[in-house]
Amino acid sequence: MSKFEAFFLNHRTHLLLFMGILVVYGLSFYQRQADYSFFWMNNSQDYVVEDVTLLASTDSYYWLKMARELDKGTLGKGQKEITKGYPDLQMLAIQDTPSLLAVLISFAKNFTDGDYYRAGILLVPILSGLFVFPLFFYFNKLGFGASAIYGGLIATFGHAYYDRTMMGRVDTDLLNTFFPLVVACFILFMGREKSWRVNFSLSFASGLTMYLFTWWYQQPSFIGVYLFVMAAYLVISRVSWKQIAPILIIFLLASGPEHVAQILASLQTFLRAYVSPPPTGGIAWPNILSTVAEVQSRTVATKLKMLHGFVPLVYAGFAGLVYLCIRRFRQMIPIAPLIALGIWSMVGPNRFVMYVAPIIGVGTGVLLEVLIKSSWQKIRAPQAMLPVVSIILMFTLFFSTASYTGFYAHAGPIIPASMVRALLDIKRVVPRNSAMFTPYWEYGYALMEVGDFATYHDGGLQGGMRTTLISKATMSDDQKDMVSLISYLEDSGFNPLSAKIRNEQLTANDLMELVFGYTEDFKGENVYVLYLEEMLWKLSSLSYFGTWDFTGRKSASLDFVELHCFSMADNIMRCRDGTIDLDRGLMNDGTVDVPLRAALFVDNGYVVERFDYDRDEGYYLQVLEKNGKVFRILVADEQLFRTNFNQQYLLGYYDRRYFEEVYNDFPVARVLKVKKTDTGATTE
């Protein structure tokens, strides 16, 4: 018998299980790559605009921008990024250090003819499934290797994880479960029976992994978490204190002293982002967490369906997890942070549900595997066939319920092709690095990457004073307020304003009078107000900031009501839910007459016909047309109708003394240049 045959016979169960996990990784890779190669490319008109391949998350544009700047050599030199945090400008990368993701994108572009978009996309199928390997090694050590196969399938295709790592999502979530699982594996293999050399080596390996994780995710607080977990595991494993101390020191040193020094600051940042955003001085700002989808808290039932649409399997997963924690308490300690994040996610932010997905999948597999082993013993079947049967049943269970997961889902672009096309057009119209004053922050990274525009706020610099003041200017009924704010920021900036609030103990009223009562002339160059169609669907969030009452700490909820009408004859519009009589100025849903104050027909961004009704109260009907064809009908109340957002963007009523239109692809995008003029003039 050859050495190879002997090795196979001695390790055939582990080899068969490992082959199963290779198939899981292959499926993860194939489904994502096939989504791009077949679906995206067959519908390229929706996914590719000129040299820009559209991406599935707004943050993806940030990492591509960072990779570009890394190759230009502008990072790590203390230089502020000209497109971030206008007008003060901010560092593009945290601690001016490029993320490992940006480094990988920079490297991958060598295989895509210098195309950063395709380089990022290339990484998605490669990286997203890597977590299945440490998951397998961890639970195979516990005697549940087949369960890890099912856990890998559930995690990589369940909506909790798949929706955050699907094709086009070039983001840190691609490896955010991989690194913690690798660290957990190294900790698991430590023990009292191991020599100090082995334990020290495992400590160094776990620290090095944590160094890479911190470089990747830029959250050093995880070092502190795993330091505690490692210490707890070693104590419960009865490892000598003479070993524990140097093991922990080696872990910290390998994690990087510069990262260790940032643990407390990182924890503070985490708490501010996900628990309690801080005030500026004595001014409390709206909580941006209530407007960010990934940190909002959905119902527990919804989150369970994110793990798997067939909820009984999720319940089985939790039951299996409880079984593991009871039967393998000590061995489950290294993976406790992922379990804790997952449990917290059931009542906290949605974005952390993905961390528990592989564990719940394994839990379901454990119950199945225990049942298989028990039945196998009763029928006295050959033990050699047990792993084969277990693997087959794991795959069978998954594919029989695959329709409840994201297995058949296609990733869509987070920003439509029409908007990207408009940004590229605007880029050719305005000077390079022009500042874009945008009502909403979410598209900041795309503006920076696609258009090379300077932005006031973005996905990493949002909320607080920046977004509140910008939103208030946008939701104001006075266009002079917008010019005053822009003029003040051009002369002073956000950072000095923040310092002024603290040093002079300004109240909210003082602040409003300071920035919206500013009378100095606008002295800036190339500053523009940019409206995008996608912002229509963010209006409730925009109004949350724009109508914020600092005293009552609440906001008015403003949003358009969209009507679906299909015909018009004799000034009677027939809609899905009723009729609109333009002669009488009444909307009727079949039971109640709702009065109108005015009905406006808007073609290509300008009012072409208007019906006014002699009433003190009522709503405003806005019929939006493109080249004479109606595409959207909106109803607004008095407050929303008067806002700068509605007047400038939808109706074209911008004050010509303050603004000049330089681009109009209504309704996709509209750009107004802020003119050098006297802000003390009265509004027409």
Image: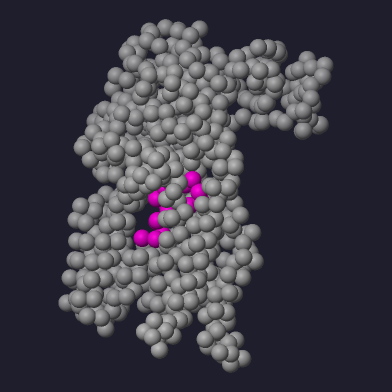
In the image, residue 74 sits, relative to residue 249, either above or below, namely above
Report which quarter residue 506 is drawn in: top left
Residue 176 painted magenta? yes
Report which quarter residue 401 is drawn in: bottom right
Q: In the image, what residue occupies the spot 32% across and 75% down? A: 189
Query: x and y percent of residue 279 in the render?
Result: 35, 38
In the image, residue 350 sits, relative to residue 67, either above or below, namely below
Q: How is the image coloured?
A: one colour
**Along the viewing direction, whichever of 405 and 408 lies nearer the viewer:** 408
Q: Quadrant for the N terminus, please.
A: bottom left
Residue extending furthest toward the front:
2
Q: In the image, what residue occupies the spot 46% across and 22% down? A: 426
Q: Taken as a whole, is the magenta stretch helix, strand or loop? A: loop
Q: In the image, what residue occupies the spot 58% across and 90% down? A: 381
Residue 349 painted magenta? no
Task: Indicate left or right for 505 with 376 as reference.
Answer: left
First to last magenta residue range: 165-179
Task: Indicate left or right for 15 with 250 as reference.
Answer: right
